[in-house]
Amino acid sequence: MATFRMPSLGADMAAGTLVEWLKKPGDPVRRGDVIAVVETQKGAIEVEVFEDGVVQQILVEPGATLPVGTPLATIAGTGGEPAAEAVEPVVTPPSVPSILVPSVSALLPEPDGVGQGHRPASPVARRLAARQGIDLSGLRGHGPGGAILLADVERAIAAPARRPAGLNLAEMRQAIAAAMARSKREIPHYYLSTTVDQSKAQTWLATVNADRPPERRLLLAALELKAVALALRRLPEFNGHHRDGAFQPGQGIHVGAAVSIRGGGLAAPAIHDTDRLGLDELMERFRDLVARTRAGHLRSSELGDPTITVTSLGDRRVDGVFGVIYPPQVAIVGFGRLVERPWVVDGRLAVRPLVTLTLAADHRVSDGHRGSLFLAEIDRLLQEPEAL
């Protein structure tokens, strides 16, 4: 038997609110299936299961705010074997400081004067419908017994660029600040920077994108993400986590792409196996990740296992960004804006498109020498864009 627990979705999460179950006792599940929705400062997160089996027992009812690691359900083996020992259901959720994880009611305040009748619906779906003026009686529910889920309400809202429902940006900023303060206290940062000539990358992109429609064009960001991922193959000490006093190498290269949320806030979900993706697939996944981050449609696996973070403020006209490491990761790479400046090429002065590339890394795991090799490898790879 396996115990399905409240997942950890990053260093800035101490607890989460169980919003709804997407499976019920007796339902079969396979690794990667979404089993529940959990509300955090990053929005409503679809939580996946990591075992094959059958849902045996639901231990927590929707609406409970619980610490990371709390048992939520039990899952029997693929044959539905009974549990070796019973786990007591959680009757009264423990108290969690609201400054870290707000309750569902805090994230989605009840509006006045909007009635929704008696259609079965999850609390978060009902509140979102009320906020948006959506009549639940006109919706089709896809939950147990036809209950209306969050996704059902979201499909009814024709606003592709809307902000994540009920996302409390002030709470998110407080949680991020707490995680960054912990990072600066506990992690001995060192910082390096270099300047990268992007003329070859720009020329190659212009050629590749010449006959493509806008939605299929590659962006410089795809090349930068892929170059970081490939550089990690050669210098794996920057790819992984520092836990329990030791470095744990990543089980794959899962680059976390920092995405700003309109109105404030930040998330850095993972693009899994970044080094193995072709540039077109990587670009497609990156676009999808940005859209879902800003709509509040992330999965737990995308938030729980990035092995390094890449951040860029180039589109905000920032020349360089020196990030703070997101624990338990051990490095963060930053790209500044592309700017044309004088540059010496083969002994002659020329004007070239340049980018400031930075690294903040954990001195417990690596040092400046290795960090300089890492930045040099990223630079080398960007000089051969056709090989990415």
Image (cartoon, grey):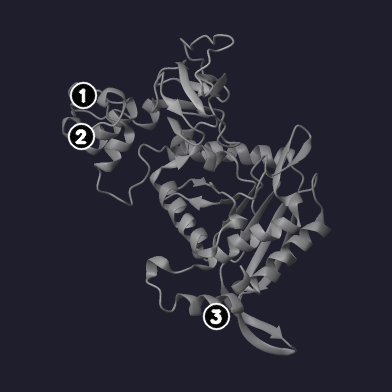
Instruction: From the top left corner, tell me how far across and down residue 56 is, in percent.
Output: 47, 17
| Distance between the alpha carbons at the discs numbered 1 and 3 | 57 Å
Q: Are marks 1 and 2 in contact (CB under 8 Å)?
A: yes
Q: Which residue is mark 1?
A: 119
Q: Which residue is mark 2?
A: 139
Label of residue 367 in the image: none
Q: Are marks 3 and 2 in contact (CB under 8 Å)?
A: no
Upstream in sequence: badge 1 or badge 2: 1
Residue type marked 3: Thr
Residue type marked 2: Leu
Q: Secondary structure at mark 3?
A: helix
Instruction: From the top left corner, tell me how far across and down residue 38 is, in percent.
Output: 45, 30
Q: In terms of image quadrants, where is residue 321? A: bottom right
At x 25%, y 26%, the residue is: 146
Q: Nearer the viewer, residue 213 or 186?
A: 213
Q: Which residue is mark 3?
A: 203
Q: Is residue 91 above or below residue 286?
A: above
**Residue 30 visible:** yes
Q: Secondary structure at mark 2?
A: loop
Q: Is residue 198 above or below residue 248?
A: below
Mark 2 crowd level (few <14, some 14–19, many ≥20, 10 Å Cα) = some
Quarter of the figure with the C terminus? bottom right
* Left-right relation of 37 to 88: left
Quarter of the figure with the N terminus? top right
